[in-house]
């Protein structure tokens, strides 16, 4: 399997490092526009592989023509938000990058699975898919899902594998905990267990902003979680994860997260198994996404 990593900034490096050290792919291509960055990162990775006695072919390059024939293309190229900003504020700047990449990558990597990481991640997946015509998924709310599980486990002093369940909707402030899926030691979540829903929801929404304020960006959490998504695809693990995949809505393809089986193909979705309330929340997310997305597309087209 050949995987291309487009963007080798903070999150791109963390994801690439985790995937390459996992040693389940044959080849990695690392691309960025910053001169020498991918090439020097390639050296670092080779040194790490030597220490672990692993063999993965790695190429770091500033030449987009080297990015060809990939099975999976992971896109983290783009601006990150600064403290106080919403991810949606990045729409126009990062969508311009996606339109440029859609043109350059699609013809060289036809039929690859494109995995969007750059924010606002779900909208960037929709933009990339619209302009490239290639099947694109977004890492979506698998990140929120792990934040939710980790927080409940910490508060209730249980092992994290005793907590199950998913967060869905749009990645970011509007993500919704799908409470009908949440269980602790196999029992449906109940506030009497020792933590309120509100507290969990606030944590999931606010913690990334706090990490960005102090550490300059989120890396280790999403870098590990996104590696697991890539591994599920490469190894055809058919794991249930909350990622955003294409949904046809009105005249657009949009990306919203819900629990879905992730392997070499994406689906089926577990949405029909959710309760009324959670399904209603997901539907509301889709509507909200659509109206904001259409407005943003209008602004983008005016700026082109
Ligand atoms: P960063 O500034 O460290 O890295 C971004 C990289 O993209 C830079 O190296 C830059 O040179 C490169 N780049 C810009 N335009 C490019 C182009 N046209 N082609 C190739 N490379 C290009 O930022 P970061 O912290 O790595 O974050 C990158 C993006 O990922 C941001 O949008 C951020 O919000 C997002 N992010 C998403 C998640 C998630 O869970 N989905 C997690 C962390 C970060
Ligand atoms: C995250 O959730 O860690 C990413 O979307 C980065 C961000 O918060 O901007």
Image (cartoon, rainbow, N blue to C red):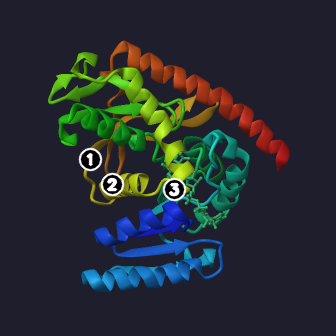
Of the pair 127 and 51, the residue shown nearer to us: 51
Q: Position of residue 202 (x, y in %)?
A: 45, 29
Looking at the image, is 160 positioned above or below residue 152? below
Quadrant in which the N terminus is drawn? bottom left
Q: Which residue is mark 1?
A: 238
Looking at the image, is 266 positioned above or below residue 257? below
Q: Earlier in the sequence, mark 3 or mark 2?
A: 3
**Crowding at mark 2 (Cα within 10 Å: few <14, some 14-19, many 20+):** many
Frontmost of labels 3 and 1 is 3
Label 1 sits on a secondary structure element that is loop
- Cα distance in 3D space between marks 3 and 1: 34 Å
Q: Which residue is mark 2?
A: 228
**Crowding at mark 3 (Cα within 10 Å: few <14, some 14-19, many 20+):** few
Of the pair 272 and 158, the residue shown nearer to us: 158
Horizontal side of residue 54 vs 130, given as left or right: left
Q: From this viewpoint, is residue 176 visible?
A: no
Q: Residue furthest top?
A: 276
- Cα distance in 3D space between marks 1 and 2: 12 Å
């Amino acid at each position: 399997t050949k995987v291309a990593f487009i963007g080798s900034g903070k999150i791109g490096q963390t994801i690439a490092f985790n995937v390459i050290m996992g040693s389940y792919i044959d080849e990695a291509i690392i691309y960025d526009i910053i001169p020498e960055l991918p090439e020097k990162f390639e050296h670092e990775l080779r040194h790490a592989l030597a220490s672990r006695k692993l063999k993965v072919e790695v190429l770091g390059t500033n030449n987009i023509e080297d990015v060809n024939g990939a099975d999976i293309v992971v896109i983290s190229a783009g601006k990150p938000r600064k403290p106080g900003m919403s991810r949606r504020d990045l729409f126009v700047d990062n969508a311009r990058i996606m339109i440029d990449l859609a043109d350059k990558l699609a013809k060289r990597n036809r039929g690859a699975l494109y995995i969007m990481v750059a924010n606002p991640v779900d909208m960037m997946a929709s933009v990339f898919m619209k302009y490239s015509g290639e099947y694109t998924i977004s890492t979506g709310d698998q990140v929120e899902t792990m934040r939710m599980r980790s927080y409940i486990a910490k508060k209730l002093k249980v092992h994290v594998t005793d907590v199950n369940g998913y967060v869905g909707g749009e990645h970011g402030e509007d993500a919704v905990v799908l409470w009908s899926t949440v269980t602790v030691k196999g029992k449906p979540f109940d506030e009497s267990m020792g933590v309120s829903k509100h507290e969990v929801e606030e944590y999931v929404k606010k913690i990334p902003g706090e990490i960005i304020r102090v550490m300059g960006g989120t890396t280790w959490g999403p870098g590990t979680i996104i590696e697991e998504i890539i591994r599920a695809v490469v190894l055809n693990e058919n794991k249930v994860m909350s990622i955003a995949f294409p949904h046809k809505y009105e005249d657009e393809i949009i990306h919203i997260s819900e629990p879905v089986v992730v392997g070499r193909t994406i689906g089926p979705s577990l949405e029909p198994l959710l309760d009324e309330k959670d399904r209603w929340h997901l539907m509301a997310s889709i509507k909200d996404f659509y109206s904001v997305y259409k407005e943003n597309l209008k602004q983008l087209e005016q700026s082109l």
